[in-house]
Every structure is written in structure tokens, then in C-alpha cells.
Amino acid sequence: MAQDRVLIVGGGPVGLVAAAFLVAEGIPITLIETQQDVADDLRASTFHPPTLDFLARLGVTAQLIEQGLICRYWQFRDRRSGAIATFDLAELHGETAFPYRVQCEQWKLAKLLRAQLEACGDATLIYGARAVTVKQDADKVVLTAERVDGTMEQFTGTYLIGADGARSTVRSQSGIAFEGMTIPELFLSLSTTFPYHDTITDLANINYIADPDEWLVLLRTPSLWRVLMPTDPTETDAAMMADAQIQRRLQSVLASPKRYEVVHKTAYRVHERVADRYVFGRILLAGDAAHVNNPLGGMGMNGGIHDAANLSEKLVAVLRGANPSLLARYERQRRKVAIDTVQAQALRNRIDLSERDPEKRQAFYDRVRATAEDPVKHRDYLMRSSMIASLREVESVQ
Ligand SMILES: Cc1cc2nc3c(=O)[nH]c(=O)nc-3n(C[C@H](O)[C@H](O)[C@H](O)COP(=O)(O)OP(=O)(O)OC[C@H]3O[C@@H](n4cnc5c(N)ncnc54)[C@H](O)[C@@H]3O)c2cc1C
């Protein structure tokens, strides 16, 4: 029956993970994605340990690891003086089956899940269709989508998951507010073939680098290094992206006699926002549609995947007869994580990395050094930064 079907809008990592969890429980889904294919652009690339645990239940972690880079260590560094503190994720042995981060582009996960879903009879994946309107009554949700050729089509389901990203149509169609703020600087993300690890010999594969004028993140993926840095939003796109300007900025990170080979470059505006509601009758929000934050800590996509796991478990129970009020618990749990953990930690990281006051900067360095040197604090910090603690803490939220 069409009414037993769950509609999912958005074929990013969150929509696809929700689809895979539902299908694994025998719930049929229809997923509507506006793009014709998975976009292999430069976005999230860090998978935290508990996300790997969730994805292992879907049978894709081994392939993700094969296509990614296992990273046991990560660092806080000072742009001029080097390493401040190194964290060792092996300390999480016993807490997770994967005591490391995996650096792997998010589109690789999307492609793996898409292939898995396409091979399964319960999933209908419709690419090249844009959700336009969403309406619900007491029994069902009706979605209208526009195909690439302009034809309109209606889909009916018992529930609808809006996983359609930061500019969610599902959210706006449902009249749900998305309050918060916009970070003044743009985030410039570059990828280069330059082997930073050969030149800076004590560099970890994941580095958060503090500087009063220009913080940096240096992340290694299997084939490239990614450089993330703040950018003046008053600069025109043409000036910001001009080759000479990009070369100048990379040379200021590390002087090299050769030109940097730049493979991708993108600048994007970053917001810190959380939706007022995640549950609106039969319409449910997850991932960037529900919350967005800065990428310092790699918690956006990971938090979205944790939403998808939590939501699908409850939705399966409701579809098997549990009281629909269970879905409100999804909102209470995951909204709390978005505000108290993800947003708070991402904001803290941005403040710490860009601190201009020398005394406060020194206090930050002293704090992270002391944390890394104390085995109990070190482990506790890893439990929080790798998002295991937030998953456990919300178990007590009814
Ligand atoms: C340029 C950029 C760089 C980023 N870099 C990082 C990073 O370095 N680190 C990090 O942690 N995070 C980063 N992020 C954030 C990260 O990519 C997101 O947190 C993550 O993609 C969230 O997954 P999602 O599935 O919720 O949303 P998305 O990945 O945005 O997926 C939403 C999907 O919905 C589709 N869609 C949208 N509207 C409709 C509609 N009306 N109908 C049908 N389909 C629709 C979109 O095409 C898209 O495929 C970045 C984001 C951007 C935009």
C-alpha cells in the first residue's frame, strides 16, 4: 500500500542512511533527489568512530575504510610554532569497534548506499526530481515533485523525512523556523596534491591550526590534502578564486619552490542554525535540514547520520504499532545534541582557533596540552569530540 511507504526528500548522506536503515527493516521507501547523480564535490570528509559503528550495521564501513584513510591521531597546532597537543583515538578501544577517524569524501558513502539501495526491491530512488510542495492530513503525506522535463508528479507516503539539506524545501513548506546566525567570514576549501606530510614531519592527518589572523584546518584524504581557511566575504568571487590569489595563500601556509597543484576550490557561507521543530505531524527533519554548524570538528554530516539512525529506529517502531508520540522523543534527543554538543563545540573551536588575545590564546594552549597529557581527561575529551558521549547522554532524555 502506498500509505506504508516512507517518502524521503534528499539523497545526501543523511537521506540515504535513513533509506538504508528503513529498507533493512523491510519498510519500503521512495527517495526524491533533485540532482541527476551524486555530486562528487568537496564537502565533509571525516567519519567519526560512532558513525562508523552505525554504518557497519548497514554493511558499508569496510568499503568506506577501503576507499578512505584511517587516522588514529589528530592535532591542535599553532600556525607558527607547530604541534600543541596530539590526541590518540586508540584510547577509545572498547568504546567503539573503530577507534579512529576515517577520512573519506562524503560522496563515496552516498555512492555506496545508492548502489546498495538500487539493488533492493523495497527502495525506489528517483533522481532528477525536485520536491516542490508537501501536504499532510491525519493519515498520509503527499509530496509534489517536478521532474527535469517540467512534468509534475505526486507521491504518497505514511511519513516523510526531509533530508534535503540546509535550504530545505520540506522545512520551509512546513513553516518551521530556522533561527540562528551567519558567520561573517566565508570558508574557503581547497584541495591540493602537495604532500604536506613529507615536509612537516610531525603533522597528523587531521590538524586544527590556531592563528590570530588566519586559522587553518589541514586534512588528509587518501589522495589529496584539504586546506580550509577563513576568507573576507567582501572580496569578489573572481578575486578570491583567482589562481594567483590561491597560490599566494597556499604559499603563506607553507612556502614551496613549486606551484601548488589545486584540484578543487570552493568558498561557502557557514551558518549556525537549528530548526524549531524536527517533527511536524507526519513530516520529520534530519541532517542539515534540521541543523547546520561550522565544520570545525567535522560534526555536521556525522550528527546528521546519527539523526538518521535515531529517527529510523523510532519510525520503524511506530510503523509496527508503537505510539507516534515516540517521534517527539527523536526531536527532544537530537535537537538537544545539535544545540548542546554540536553547535556549542563547533562555536568553541572557532573561537579558540581564531583567538586574538595572547593571554586567552595561551590559556587555550595550556588547556589542551593539560587535557592531552592527563590520561583520564584525554579519553574524556575524545569521547566528547568523537561524538560518542552525546549519543550516550541523550539515552536518558525521554
Ligand atoms: C560547500 C560545502 C562544504 C562543506 N564542507 C564540509 C566540511 O569540510 N566538513 C563538514 O563536516 N561538513 C561540511 N559541509 C557540510 C556537510 O556537507 C553537510 O553537513 C552534509 O552534507 C549534510 O548531509 P545532508 O544529507 O543532511 O544534506 P546534503 O548533503 O546537503 O544533501 C541534501 C540533498 O537534498 C537534495 N535536495 C535539496 N533540495 C531538494 C528538493 N527540493 N528536492 C529534492 N532533493 C533536494 C540536494 O540535492 C542534496 O543532494 C559542507 C557543506 C557545503 C555546502
Image (cartoon, rainbow, N blue to C red):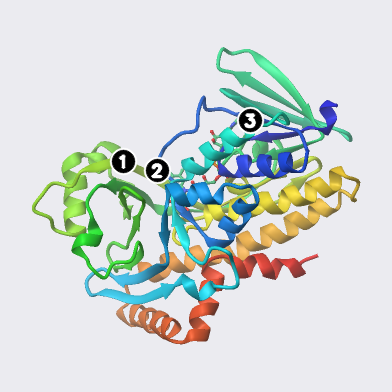
Does any atom of ligand 1 lie closer than 8 Å to the CB of label 3? no
Label pair 1/2, CB-CB below 8 angstroms: yes
Q: For numbered disc 2, what is the local secondary structure?
A: loop
Q: Quadrant of the C terminus?
A: bottom right
| Residue 359 appearing in the image | yes
Name above or below for residue 354 compared with residue 324: below
Q: Which residue, as the protein is rendered here, is positioned at the far left?
A: 257
| Label 3 – label 2 distance at C-alpha | 27 Å
Q: Quadrant of residue 14?
A: top right
Which percent across, then down, holds residue 367? 42, 83
Kind of residue at disc 3: Ala
| Label 1 – label 2 distance at C-alpha | 7 Å
Which residue has dot 2 on it? 42
Which residue has dot 3 on it? 119
Q: For numbered disc 1, what is the local secondary structure?
A: strand
Which residue has dot 1 on it? 264
Which percent across, then down, holds residue 191? 30, 47
- The residue drawn where x is 42% and y is 50% is 68
Q: Residues within 10 Å of mark 1 (few under 14, many from 20)?
A: few
Q: How many marks?
A: 3
Label placed on residue 44: none
Kind of residue at disc 2: Leu
Name above or below for residue 267 compared with residue 344: above
Kind of residue at disc 1: His
Does any atom of ligand 1 lie closer than 8 Å to the CB of label 2? yes
Sequence-wise, the earlier of marks 3 and 2 is: 2
